[in-house]
Amino acid sequence: MIDEIFSQRARAYASRREIQLGRQLGLGTHGAVFAAESKLKPLRSAIKIYKERDPYDRERVVYQRLAEHEVTEIEGFHVPQLLGVDSELLIVEMTVVARPFVLDFAGAYLDQAPEFPAGVMEDWEADKREQFGPRWVIVESILQTLRSYGVHLLDIHSNNIAFLDHT
């Protein structure tokens, strides 16, 4: 049922923006992602349809902040560019990027990181160090650069900070 609701909203957005929907690229915690292509110009994009307003708002404002600073890559990792938003349909449209990339800002916070009980962030960092291994230094640098723009990204894993190779 949730897939049909996403599909209906995606079709409505596609009609409004004169884009053609492609296949579903993913379904995650915050919503679904579909490939899209402009009918007016050769531009591949993706639209993300959100289940709830809060993650939509978080991701939208992060993409807007990065656009204000003309961020297209961080530490050599591509960052999707904001192409459109629809606050009624809870949809963000962005460019499709190739590896290496940084994406999925629905779990990010702008200008202030959330407060956590003592030890939570230390455990989080230990877990992420283990997940990324020797590449943690690069991930840490990416996170620091994002923080310099006021973006606090906490939901990180190999699907949203993806290196050129798949390891």
Image (cartoon, rainbow, N blue to C red):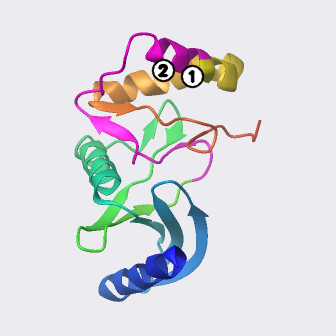
Q: Position of residue 91 (x, y in %)?
A: 35, 68
Query: Residue at image x 47%, y 27%?
Result: 142
In the rendered image, which residue does mark 2 sit on? 141
| Label 2: few (<14), some (14–19) or many (≥20) C-alpha neighbours in 10 Å | few
Q: Is residue 115 magenta?
A: yes
The answer for how far apart the CA atoms under marks 2 and 1 are is 5 Å
Could you tell whether 47 is left or right of 111 in the image? right
| 100 or 144, nearer to the observer | 144
| Label 1: few (<14), some (14–19) or many (≥20) C-alpha neighbours in 10 Å | few
Q: Position of residue 117 (x, y in %)?
A: 37, 16
Looking at the image, is 52 positioned above or below residue 35? above
| 147 or 53, nearer to the observer | 53
Label 1 SS: helix
Q: Position of residue 122 (x, y in %)?
A: 49, 12
Identify the image quadrant of residue 107: top left
Looking at the image, is 79 positioned above or below residue 14? above
Asked whether residue 25 appears in the rendered view, the answer is yes
Identify the image quadrant of residue 164: top right
Label 2 close to label 1 by CB (< 8 Å):
yes
Could you tell whether 84 is left or right of 120 in the image? left
Label 2 SS: helix
Total tally of numbered discs in the picture: 2
Q: Position of residue 106 (x, y in %)?
A: 39, 48
The label shown at residue 95 is none
In the rendered image, which residue does mark 1 sit on? 138
Could you tell whether 86 is left or right of 45 in the image? left
Q: Amino acid at mark 1?
A: Ile
Q: Which residues are magenta?
A: 98-126
